[in-house]
């Protein structure tokens, strides 16, 4: 085979190699979920039905809640709070993380406050947030989600900026690179893995904050469904919003992985 033919066949071979691992990944993922559901279905009848129900009963309850419209209404209410708080947290977290990571004075000014607030259980601050916003509307729940999400984004962004390879910075300065090019070509690409890791952590914390806020600040959304049906021991229906929250986590994590492939394709190649 000539060199030109080898070069032409290389991309197709790479595509074939890239397709098979993806199919294998999805097979493992779906297979693990199927195993958990089968074990759950098999063991559930031996447990107290007032505590846990099999997946088949939860599926029936899911259809009932969808037909009545309860699930959609609750999901939209919860999504409003989560998306609003998550966006606010990402914007504030990335901004403060970049500022404190790049400038030592800003780091010394903010680090004690960040350490103190991050050490305090966020759940303990939710009643204070509710009082500040007078327990009205979506604002207190949005603020609660933002509180849960902001610290992983801030701290990871800060570490990403502070851990940029000093050799790369020195080379850029040796070529008289402007501050703007230094950020776009060196600092932000190097910090991207840390930022994305912080956003992934923030998704899980934000979903927890969303449900806790719905428990403590006005019973609405998916949190309300959990409490409502849990109080009357309709565990099949109570599990529907729980699984819905888990599915939200999977979807949002998948979106971040897709975004990672778009803005930082070199990470996917390294993996």
Image (cartoon, rainbow, N blue to C red):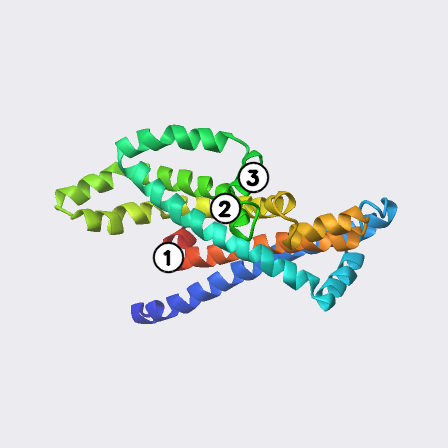
Q: CA distance from mark 2 to mark 1?
A: 28 Å
Circle number at residue 211: none
Looking at the picture, tell me which residue is in the foreground, 142 or 99: 142
What residue would you read off at disc 1? Answer: 263
Q: Could you tell me which residue is drawn at 43 percent across and 43 percent down?
A: 153
Instruction: Choose the circle earlier in sequence order: 2 or 1.
Output: 2
The secondary element bearing badge 3 is classed as helix
Q: Could you tell me which residue is drawn at 45 percent across and 28 percent down?
A: 116
Number of the front mark, 2 or 1: 2
Q: CA distance from mark 1 to mark 3?
A: 34 Å
Looking at the picture, tell me which residue is in the foreground, 212 or 257: 212
Query: Left or right: 2 with respect to 227?
Result: left
Residue 185 percent location from the top left of the image: 25, 51
Residue 139 percent location from the top left of the image: 51, 50
Q: Could you tell me which residue is drawn at 72 percent across and 48 percent down?
A: 227
Circle number at residue 126: 3
Q: Quadrant of residue 75?
A: bottom right
Q: CA distance from mark 2 to mark 3?
A: 9 Å
Residue 250 percent location from the top left of the image: 58, 54
Query: Left or right: 242 with respect to 234?
Result: left
Q: Quadrant of residue 51?
A: top right
The secondary element bearing badge 2 is classed as helix
Instruction: Choose the circle earlier in sequence order: 1 or 3.
Output: 3
What residue would you read off at disc 2? Answer: 143
Number of labels in the image equals 3
Looking at the picture, tell me which residue is in the foreground, 13 or 40: 40
Query: Left or right: 220 with respect to 252?
Result: right
């Amino acid at each position: 085979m000539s060199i030109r033919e080898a070069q032409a066949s290389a991309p197709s071979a790479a595509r074939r190699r890239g397709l098979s691992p993806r199919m294998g990944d999805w097979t493992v993922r779906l297979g693990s979920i199927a195993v958990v559901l089968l074990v759950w279905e098999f063991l559930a009848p031996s447990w107290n039905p007032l505590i846990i129900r099999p997946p088949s009963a939860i599926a029936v309850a899911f259809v009932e809640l969808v037909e009545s419209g309860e699930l959609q209404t609750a999901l939209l209410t919860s999504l409003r709070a989560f998306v609003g708080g998550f966006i606010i947290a990402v914007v504030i977290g990335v901004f403060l993380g970049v500022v404190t990571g790049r400038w030592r004075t800003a780091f010394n000014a903010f680090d004690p406050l960040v350490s103190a607030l991050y050490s305090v259980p966020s759940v303990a601050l939710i009643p204070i947030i509710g009082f500040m916003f007078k327990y009205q509307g979506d604002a207190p729940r949005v603020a609660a989600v933002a509180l849960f999400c902001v610290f992983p984004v801030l701290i990871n962004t800060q570490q990403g900026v502070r851990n940029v390879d000093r050799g790369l910075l020195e080379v850029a300065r040796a070529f008289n690179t402007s501050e703007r090019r230094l950020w776009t070509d060196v600092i932000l690409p190097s910090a991207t893995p840390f930022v994305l890791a912080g956003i992934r952590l923030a998704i899980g914390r934000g979903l927890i904050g969303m449900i806790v806020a719905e428990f403590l600040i006005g019973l609405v959304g998916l949190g309300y469904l959990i409490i409502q049906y849990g109080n009357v021991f309709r565990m099949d229906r109570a599990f529907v919003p729980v699984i819905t929250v888990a599915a939200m986590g999977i979807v949002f994590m998948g979106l971040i992985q897709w975004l990672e492939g778009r803005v930082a394709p070199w990470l996917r190649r390294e993996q």
